[in-house]
Image (cartoon, grey):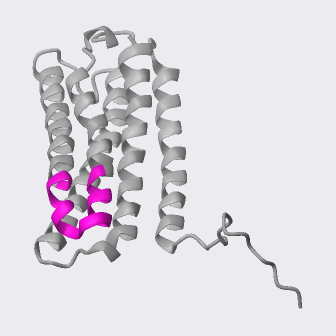
């Protein structure tokens, strides 16, 4: 039997955690769903015979900055957890939650404006159907992430989170980064290309 000697610079390959594999598998499946919704949005774009049209949309720049900034605060939270445990984690984690919640609340206000002031509902025309379906699918994913963040904050508040918990929190961070990347695509398709 031959033993392979590793140099000091090389590290042995280690199997990824089941959580990371599961999250990457979920992300792959979710990418497929989002691709279908994006293709449907683009396919039906401009095919509504009656208004309102995508011209009524105003790019939610502030909300997008909030959501995309939450990826940075998420990373700072995970690094804080690795370094000092829950003490270095909770502030960044709650800021991440607040940024995500601001995004979701702003999306709700945008929808209220579109429904009440512009007359755009999910059944108004093809644009309304595909717009609310695509943006709503993303909003649902944000909501799921926020619920998971609240649960994690609850664990931290009860003293159940430590440095050893970091790999599990990193799995949730992967999901949140996915939600942010999807928003970049959705924002580009709906608010830039689609107008």
The residue that appears at 46% across and 70% down in the rendered structure is 19
Q: Main secondary structure of the magenta part?
A: helix
Please tell me which residue lies in front, 22 or 50: 22
Numbered label tally: 0
Query: As drawn, is 25 to the left or to the right of 155?
Result: right
The residue that appears at 35% across and 50% down in the rendered structure is 176
Query: As drawn, is 178 to the left or to the right of 153?
Result: right
Query: As drawn, is 25 to the left or to the right of 124?
Result: right
Residue 151 in sight from this viewpoint: no
The furthest residue to the right: 1
| Segment tinted magenta in the rendering | 76-93
Dividing the picture into quarters, in which one does residue 15 lie?
Answer: bottom right
Q: Where 184 sits versus 47, above or below?
A: below
Query: As drawn, is 69 to the left or to the right of 187?
Result: left
The furthest residue to the bottom: 1
Q: Position of residue 84 (x, y in %)?
A: 24, 67
Q: Where 46 sits versus 70, above or below?
A: above
Q: Quadrant of the N terminus?
A: bottom right
Please tell me which residue lies in front, 119 or 3: 3
Q: Where 118 sits versus 92, above or below?
A: above
Q: Position of residue 12 (x, y in %)?
A: 67, 72
Q: Position of residue 33 (x, y in %)?
A: 49, 45
- Residue 9, magenta (yes or no): no
- Residue 84, magenta (yes or no): yes
Q: Where 147 sits versus 185, above or below?
A: below
Residue 146 in sight from this viewpoint: yes
Please tell me which residue lies in front, 61 or 76: 76
Q: Quadrant of the C terminus?
A: top left
Dividing the picture into quarters, in which one does residue 86 lie?
Answer: bottom left
Q: Position of residue 42 (x, y in %)?
A: 49, 22
The residue that appears at 31% across and 58% down in the rendered structure is 78
């Amino acid at each position: 039997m031959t033993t392979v000697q590793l140099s000091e610079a090389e590290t042995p390959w280690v199997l990824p955690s089941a959580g990371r594999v599961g999250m990457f598998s979920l992300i792959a499946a979710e990418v497929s769903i989002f691709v279908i919704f994006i293709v449907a949005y683009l396919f039906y774009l401009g095919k509504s015979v009656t208004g309102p049209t995508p011209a009524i949309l105003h790019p939610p720049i502030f909300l997008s900055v909030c959501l995309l900034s939450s990826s940075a605060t998420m990373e700072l939270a995970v690094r804080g957890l690795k370094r000092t445990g829950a003490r270095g984690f909770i502030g960044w984690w709650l800021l991440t939650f607040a940024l995500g919640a601001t995004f979701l609340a702003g999306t709700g206000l945008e929808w209220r404006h579109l429904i009440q002031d512009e007359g755009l509902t999910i059944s108004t025309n093809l644009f309304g159907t595909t717009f609310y379906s695509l943006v709503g699918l993303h909003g649902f994913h944000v909501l799921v992430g926020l619920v998971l963040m609240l649960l994690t904050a609850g664990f931290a508040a009860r003293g159940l989170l430590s440095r050893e918990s970091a790999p599990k929190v990193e799995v949730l961070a992967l999901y949140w980064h996915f939600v942010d990347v999807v928003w970049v695509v959705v924002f580009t398709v709906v608010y830039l290309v689609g107008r």
